[in-house]
Image (spheres, grey):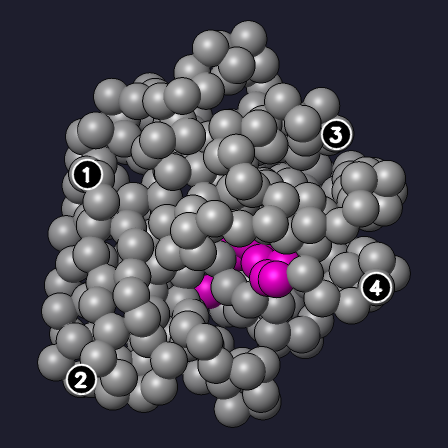
Amino acid sequence: MSMEYRLRRTLPSDRVAIIMPVDHGLIFDRIEGLETPSEPFAAWGKNDVTGFMMTPGQVRQTARYFAANPHLTRVLTIDTYYDYREMDGGGSHGLITDIEEAVRMGVDAVKMLFPWNMSNAERVAMCTRVGKIVNECNRWEIPLVLEPVIIGAPRSEEVIVHEEKIARIAYDLGAHIIKIAFPGEERTRRLVEELKVPLVIAGGPLAGNPADTVDAVAQTIRSGARGVIVGRNIWQRERSEGEKVLADIAKLTREVKFDD
């Protein structure tokens, strides 16, 4: 399978992708709404999502379900971290699988964090690690979703500006898709226009009322992003409310087509 094939599956041309992340167990242990890690797929797969962001354990345990539902894509999380909370804090980041194994499992893309609240020496090591992964992804023709992030920081103006700068480093390292927390409509549009790499926007933890979530997605789509990553803002809500939010988001994503 080619890079182009996998990119088009992950980010379709006839709509904005809705990728539901359910890989939180790698860092959060047992989390509300995800007590049984294999349940979200059958529970939400028919609610107009385009795919899921998953752990290796989830990929292996749900192979039969995805074989029966080939329209759904799988983005495999290949790393984990513990625990960056402050600049130059003593966190640690590492890989939990490799690209050859991801291809063997048949996933459509891989995803990796790009945390930046670390020492300069750790930043160099991080860039070196990402560079090697990009090379492996190019070799095996599978896209890398790279996520620039200041982990644990409040969404202050300073953090938003900082993450925008890190997104540019992610571009220079060769990321095929960049995942970033929503920096606002204007900044998202600027990143889309300047970097010319597909952007997907993360919804983050459960917050605000449903209308706020839908409005943020609407701004994201107007800005030219290729996908929205919405998980806890859906599956941690009461079921009927979560279904309504997802239906409203899906309607917005189907109003856009891309010329690729």
Mark 3 or 1, nearer chain start: 3
| Residue that badge 4 annotates | 209
| Residue that badge 2 annotates | 120
Distance CA(mark 1)–CA(mark 4): 39 Å
Q: Classify residue 251 as left or right of residue 68.
A: right
| Residue 130, quarter of picture | bottom left
Q: Are marks 1 and 4 in contact (CB under 8 Å)?
A: no
Secondary structure beneath dot 1 equals: loop
Report the quarter where the N terminus lies.
top left
- Say which amino acid is labelled 4: Asn
Residue 20: horizontal and vertical position, in percent?
A: 59, 42
Report the quarter where the C terminus lies.
top right
Residue nearest the observer in this picture, 43 or 6: 43
Secondary structure beneath dot 3 equals: loop
Q: Are marks 1 and 2 in contact (CB under 8 Å)?
A: no
Residue nearest the observer in this picture, 63 or 143: 63
Q: Give residue 47's mark.
A: 3
User: Residue visible at 52% across and 34% down?
Assistant: 36
Residue nearest the observer in this picture, 82 or 16: 82
Tell me which segment is drawn in magenta: 195-205
User: Residue visible at 59% across and 19% down?
Assistant: 71
| Residue that badge 1 annotates | 98
- Say which amino acid is labelled 2: Asn
> Where is 194 relative to 66, above or below?
below
> Where is 63 relative to 14, above or below?
above
Q: Classify residue 105 as left or right of residue 234.
A: left
Distance CA(mark 2)–CA(mark 4): 39 Å
Distance CA(mark 3)–CA(mark 1): 31 Å
Distance CA(mark 1)–CA(mark 2): 25 Å
Count residues near mark 1 (Cα–Cα under 10 Å), then give few for <14, some for 14-19, many for 20+.
Answer: some
